[in-house]
Image (spheres, helix red, strand yellow):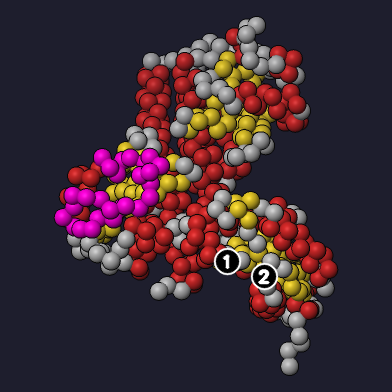
């Protein structure tokens, strides 16, 4: 039987791995820890084609080749992700009996199928229960998206290399003919030397490849595009993922004022929402009475030419590139419009790459079931806050929360009800936190609430509010749940981080022994002899 340390190590290993093959190997090790299979298959789902990915199928074990040969026979069943098909089940028709299947879903979307062959002791329920202990679906979904993003980056890199070759060929022909090319337009139009085009593509492409700092990449992009195209302004509008907030990166010429503050107004926020609905470039020189944008707001920019280029990733608008010229009207040539589109693709990849990186960092410190901090992040924060509290002579309180009778809930109503109860406690904790506090899931049904600059009295009051909030929470199955809570404070009850945990844990134990659904403080316990 695996220890809690082993389980947490494998959980962390899953979340920090970005390669599908690596995650599959870790998943194979997890299955081998509780089963004795002849073969294991991990088949990733391709959401674009709505079928199993041919490129991401991984087979492990002594009978891996035999299982690979049998997969096609059951593929129709594997591709069905209806509600009644998601749970683990045993598939018929296999020579490697039994063939146990578990379908993984993340955020309501299919992710992968795990097949375990040849273990006569393994039941579908056992497979499902064991795999549900780990963030397998999240890890596989993440690494599949990373793999597809790498393919997209490679495709764009090849596209830009071809673009550079084409530009060099255009320049060679122009030189041979003794003609100074202006990119397909008169000197008053979109003027750009071929050498500058090549340099621009190289510099932005290199920035995308070499940095995960999205702020640095986007500022580089707007500056290089603005300078090279002799624009008055170049902006990137980047909505924050899963948020109503957005950031604007701006380049403006020396004789032109900044317009970033315009986007902080209600009219600016409305403009951003409208811009994020666009899926094709919008030339503001062709405005009509039917324009979706506020004309009065556009006049604030004082441009004579403007083009809005949406940044599209997998059919989603993830931002906008906004080009402005305040000196002259421009007719955007076909060649340069195509080049701007290619540069927009580069900026799009930079944003999505950065979003993915930030998501990985978030997942490394977040509990997959509840969305609050995980044990690793809690331990790191406890050490830092303890050092700070000691240095400045501040109090530091710890609240330990343990759900009452989780095993009974799981046995009576099933693990989904138990998970719902755990999520409810996580929600109660996070909604009770100040911005400086940290709510974390310590493991299983145990939670922590770390309260910097907080004494025992305030910590106990907060703990009591949390207890009542949990008791009043409705969940499917048991309807109501309760929790026992222990509270301890530095420096009253300890001299080091481990002592704070031990003191709070002893108080929690006393709450359990005293009848559950109550708060007990470390100072109320008998003094140690």
- At x 42%, y 46%, the residue is 105
Residue 70 drawn at (x, y percent): 18, 49
What count of labels does the image hold? Answer: 2
Residue 62 drawn at (x, y percent): 20, 64
Q: Which residue is mark 2?
A: 516
- At x 63%, y 59%, the residue is 481
Q: Residues within 10 Å of mark 1 (few under 14, many from 20)?
A: some
- Front residue of 255 and 139: 139
Q: Secondary structure at mark 2?
A: loop
Tell me the quarter of the image containing the N terminus: bottom left
Residue 378 drawn at (x, y percent): 63, 65
Furthest residue in direction top, as rendered = 289
Would residue 243 be seen by someone viewing this image from the given angle? yes
**Marks 2 and 1: in contact by CB < 8 Å?**
yes
Comes first in the chain, label 1 or label 2: 1
Give the answer, above or below, for where 170 lies relative to 418.
above
Span highlighted in magenta in the image: 76-101
Residue 433 drawn at (x, y percent): 73, 56
Q: Which residue is mark 1?
A: 405
Furthest residue in direction bottom, as rendered = 529
- At x 50%, y 12%, the residue is 185
Q: Secondary structure at mark 1?
A: loop
Would residue 454 be seen by someone viewing this image from the given angle? no
- Front residue of 450 and 20: 450
Q: Residues within 10 Å of mark 2 (few under 14, many from 20)?
A: many
């Amino acid at each position: 039987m695996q220890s809690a340390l082993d389980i947490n190590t494998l959980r962390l290993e899953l979340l920090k791995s970005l390669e599908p093959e690596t995650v599959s190997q870790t998943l194979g090790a997890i299955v081998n820890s509780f089963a004795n299979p002849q073969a294991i298959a991990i088949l990733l789902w391709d959401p674009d084609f709505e079928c199993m990915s041919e490129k991401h199928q991984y087979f492990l074990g002594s009978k891996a080749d035999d299982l690979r040969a049998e997969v096609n026979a059951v593929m129709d069943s594997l591709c069905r992700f209806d509600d009644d098909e998601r749970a683990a089940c045993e598939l018929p028709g296999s020579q490697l009996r039994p063939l146990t299947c578990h379908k993984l879903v993340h955020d309501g979307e299919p992710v992968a199928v795990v097949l375990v062959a040849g273990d006569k002791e393994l039941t579908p329920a056992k497979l499902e229960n064991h795999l549900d202990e780990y963030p397998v679906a999240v890890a596989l979904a993440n690494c599949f998206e990373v793999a597809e993003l790498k393919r997209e980056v490679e495709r764009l890199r090849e596209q830009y290399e071809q673009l550079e070759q084409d530009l060099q060929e255009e320049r060679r022909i122009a030189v041979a003919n003794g003609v100074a090319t202006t990119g397909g337009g008169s000197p008053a139009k979109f003027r750009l030397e071929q050498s500058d085009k090549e340099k621009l593509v190289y510099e932005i492409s290199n920035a995308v490849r070499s940095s995960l700092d999205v702020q640095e990449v986007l500022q580089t992009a707007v500056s290089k595009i603005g300078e090279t195209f002799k624009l008055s302004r170049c902006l990137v509008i980047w909505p924050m993922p899963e948020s109503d907030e957005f950031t604007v990166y701006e380049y403006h010429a020396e004789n032109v004022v900044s317009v970033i503050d315009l986007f902080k107004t209600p009219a600016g926020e409305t403009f951003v929402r409208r811009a994020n609905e666009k899926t094709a470039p919008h030339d503001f020189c062709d405005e009509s009475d039917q324009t979706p944008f506020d004309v009065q707001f556009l006049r604030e920019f004082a441009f004579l030419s403007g083009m809005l280029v949406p940044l599209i990733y997998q059919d989603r608008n993830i931002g906008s590139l906004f080009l402005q010229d305040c000196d002259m009207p421009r007719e955007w040539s076909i060649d340069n419009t195509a080049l701007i589109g290619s540069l927009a693709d580069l900026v799009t990849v930079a944003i999505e790459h950065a979003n993915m990186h930030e998501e990985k960092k978030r997942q490394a410190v977040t509990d997959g079931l509840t969305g609050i901090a995980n044990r690793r992040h809690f331990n790191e924060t406890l050490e830092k806050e303890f050092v700070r509290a000691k240095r400045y002579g501040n109090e530091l309180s710890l609240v330990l929360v343990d759900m009452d009778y989780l095993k009974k809930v799981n046995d009576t109503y099933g693990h989904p009800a138990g998970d719902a109860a755990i999520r409810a406690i996580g929600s109660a904790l996070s909604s009770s936190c100040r911005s400086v506090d940290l709510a974390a899931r310590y493991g299983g049904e145990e939670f922590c609430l770390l309260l910097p600059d907080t004494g025992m009295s305030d910590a106990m009051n907060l703990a009591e509010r949390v207890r009542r909030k949990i008791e009043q929470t409705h969940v499917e199955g048991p309807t109501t749940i309760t929790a026992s809570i222990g509270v301890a404070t530095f420096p009253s009850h300890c001299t080091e981080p481990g002592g704070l945990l031990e003191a709070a844990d002893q108080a929690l134990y006393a709450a359990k022994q005293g009848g559950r659904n109550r708060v007990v403080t470390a100072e109320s316990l008998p003094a140690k002899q």
